[in-house]
Image: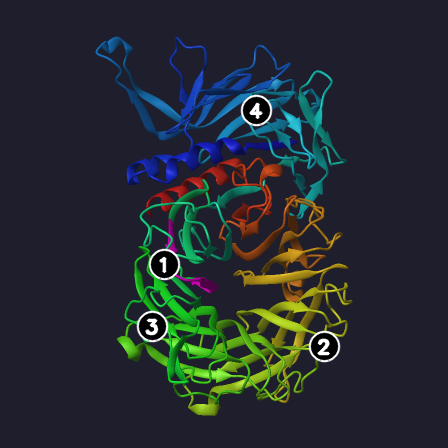
Amino acid sequence: MKFSFGLALLGFVCSGLEADTSPDALRLLATAPLRFEPASPDGPVEFVARGLHFRYDFSSRQAVLRARGKALRLQFEGAASEASIQGEEKLASKTNYYLGNDRSKWRTSVPNFGRLSVHDLYAGIDLVYYGNAADLEYDLTVKPGANPDRIRLRLTGSGARLDRHGNLISELIQKRPVAYQIGADGKRIPIASRYRKNSDGTYGFALGRYDRGRDLVIDPVLTTAVYLFGSEQDIAYGIGHDSKGLLYIAGTTLSSDFSPGGTPYQATAVGGFDLFLSVINPVNSAIYYSSYFGGSLDETFGGMSVSPNGDVYLTGATASADFPTVNPYQSGPATSTSTASGTTTTTTGTNAFVAWFDVFQTLRYSTFIGGTGTLDIGLAVAADSQGRMWVTGDTDSADFPQLNPMQIYGGMQDMFVVGIDPSQSGTATLIYSSFLGGTGWDIGHDIAVAPDGTLWVVGSTSSVDINIIGPCFQCSYQGGGDGYVAHVNPALSGANALVFATYLGGSSLEEVKRVVIDPAGRIIVSGYTLSSNFPVTGNALQPQFGGDTDAFVSVLDLSKTPSSATLAYSTYFGGSDVDVPFDMKQDGNGFLYISGYTLSSGLPASANALQSQYDGTMDAFALKLALPTEVASAGRSSAISYFTYLGSDGIQIGYGIDFDSQGNIYLGGFTSGPIFDPFGGPPKTTNPGNVDVFVAGFSPTAAVSTSERDKRLSDRERALAGRY
C-alpha cells in the first residue's frame, strides 16, 4: 500500500508571501522545486530544505518547519529508533556556503536531492519526502504483511483537531485523505478513508475495504487556493489559462483595496464597480498581476477569453464616460438630447465595451460600442486566428451601430453580433455588426468561432417571431422563454449571414448559457431549464427533470439529415432544488467541464470529491462530463468523470471553470464564507459575510509515479517562473 500526503498550508503561507512583490530573480526562487541537502554535520538535524521565508529540517522520525519565528513539528511516534534517512534522486545543482572568513567552516559542493527516504520507519513501512513547489509532501509505502495501524502522527503547533469534513487541522495542515487503488485495467478504484484520533492524542488512518495485494494511494487534491479580495464586494466571473499554465481571472470589484500584484495597468479604483484582471501561478497560488480597469462610474463584466499566448479579451458594459479607450471605434458613450419647456437635456446610456490586453498586460485596444438606449452589454467575446474579436450580448438601442447587418432592430431587446479588427484604425476597426432578434426579449449569452471562421451564437428568447433558418430542430416557439442557437457567417451579405437558427426548449423557461464546437463539428450547448418536458435523448445521463431548475447539456448534429438538425444527445443534470450552470469548456479528449451553483442535496459526487455532500446553503459545483461517444471509447460505465460540491457556511457560486494539460480543474467565482478551511487552504481574512473572489484548483486524475509527478512539476514551474 502507498499513502501520499500533503502539508498544504505550508506552501500557501510561504510561497504566497514571496511572490507578489519579488523581482524576477526572487520569483524564480519562489517557484523553484523544493530541494533537499545534507545539514551541517555538527547540527541536530540530518537534511534541510530552504525557501525565501522558510526552512524545513528533517531527521529520520520527524520534519520541522521554521518560518516567521515559529517552529511547527510533524512527528512519527513509535517509529524505529534504527531507521535512517538518506537523499535520493541526486540533482545537478549544488549549494555553496561561504560564511565568515574561517575557511574551515565553509561548505562547498553540497549535493542537492529531489527526495528523501526513510526505510523501515515502522516495520515494513517506508517514508519518502518530496516537494511540490514550496509544499512538502510525503508517501508512506506499506509493504505486504505490514500493518498501517502502526502509523501514528503527532502535530505540534496550534492544537491539532479533526474538523467536520474529516480534515486534520493544525498550523501544519493535513488534508482529508482521499484514497484509491489502480486496478489491473488501469481504472481508479475509490477506497473510503479518513483520519482517526488515537487515545494518546496522535492520529492514524481509518480505511475501508481494499485489495491488500495492490498499492493504496491517499493523495491531496487541492492544488491551488486563492482569495482575491478587498474590504467590499469582489466577484470573479471569468477564468482562463495560457499555454504556460498561468491562470487569468476577471470580474468586478467595489473595493478600493483589492488584492495587488505586479505592475498594474490601473493601480487604483476610480469609482463605483470597476473591472479587475488578475494573473495567478496555480503551482504556488501566487498573484503575479492584478489591476483595476474602469472609469468613474460602474462597469459590468460580461465575458472573457484568453489566447494560448496570454492575450486577454474582455467585454461587458460601462456607464463611465471616462472609460479607458485605445484606438477606439467609438470613443465615448452614445448620447441623446431632448428639449422640453426650452430646456435641453442630454442623456447618456450604458454602452458595451470591447477590450484587448496583450501578453504583457498592455491595453492594446478598447472601445465603446452602443446606442442611446438604456443598456447595451457585451456578454461573451471570442477571438479568431487573426486576432479579430467577435462579441455577442444584448441591446435595447434601436440606433446600435450596424455594418452589413442580417436584420433591422426587432424591438424591446435584441441580441447583437459584432466583429472588431484591432489591427485597423479607429472607426475601421468595426468590421461587422448586426441585430439578431424578434419583437420580444432576446439575449446573446455566448459566441464561438468555428474553424472555418463562422460563428455560433447562443442565448435566450421570448420572441415568437425570431428568425428560424435552415434544418431547425425546433422550428416554433415552445413557450415560457426558449433557448436559441444560431449559426452566423459574417462574410455573407445581409440576411444571408444567418445560415441556421433553432429554438431549444420546453414549455417553461430556458436559457442557453454556453456553446462549444467539438472536433466533429457538433454543437454542444449548456444552460438551465424549468421545463419538465425539455427535449432529452434515450441515452441521457438523467432523463427525468429533477425539479425546480435543472442544468442541461445538449448536442446538435447538423450533418446527419439534410432536412432537420438532429439532437444527438441531451440530458438534464440536477436535483430537487435549483441547479444553474454558468460556464462550460471542452478538452481535447472530449470531456466537458461545467460550473455553476446548486441548492440540491444528493447530487452524484465522486468518491474523491473535494466535498461530497451539499453544505446546506448555496454551493458552487464542478462537473466533468463525458458524452456517450467518449464513454464508449474509454470503456466507462458512467458519463460522470468527476463531480464535487464546493461550499461553506456562506454562499458561493462557481461562475467560471477551466482545466489544464495536467488534468487539474480550476474553479472561480465568489464566496461569503471560509471556503478553503476544510482543505487547509488560506484563511478568509475579510469581515464575516463579505463577498470575496475564490480560485480553487484540484486534481481528480489518477496517480502517476512520484518521479513522473516531480518531473512534471519541475518543468511546469520553470516555464511559469520564466514568464514573470
Residue 309 is marked as 1
Q: Is residue 176 above or below residue 45?
A: below
Residue 590 visible to the viewer? no
Q: Which residue is mark 4?
A: 127
Picture quadrant where residue 33 is located: top left
Q: Position of residue 410 (x, y in %)?
A: 53, 87
Overall secondary structure of the magenta section: strand
Label 3, on which residue? 332
* Residue at 65% over, 54% down: 641
Amino acid type, residue under disc 2 in the picture = Gly
Q: Nearer the viewer, mark 4 or mark 1?
A: 1
Classify mark 1: helix, strand or loop: loop
- Viewer-side label of 4, 2: 2
Bin the neighbour count of mark 3 within 10 Å (Cα to Cα): few under 14, some 14-19, many 20 and up: many
The disc, 1 or 3, on the residue closer to the chain's N-terminal end is: 1
Residue 191 — which label?
none
The residue to which callout 2 is attached is: 506
**Looking at the image, is mark 1 or mark 2 nearer the viewer?**
2
Q: Which residues are magenta?
A: 290-305
Q: Which residue is most to the front? A: 341
Residue 244 horizontal side relative to residue 618, left or right: left
Q: Residue at x 42, y 78 (%)?
A: 418
Q: Position of residue 280 (x, y in %)?
A: 43, 47
Proximity of marks 1 and 2: CB atoms separated by less than 8 Å: no
State which quarter of the image contains the N terminus. top right
The numbered mark, 3 or 4, whose residue comes first in the sequence reads 4
Say if mark 4 contacts mark 1, CB within 8 Å: no
Q: Looking at numbered disc 1 in the image, what kind of residue is underneath it? A: Asn
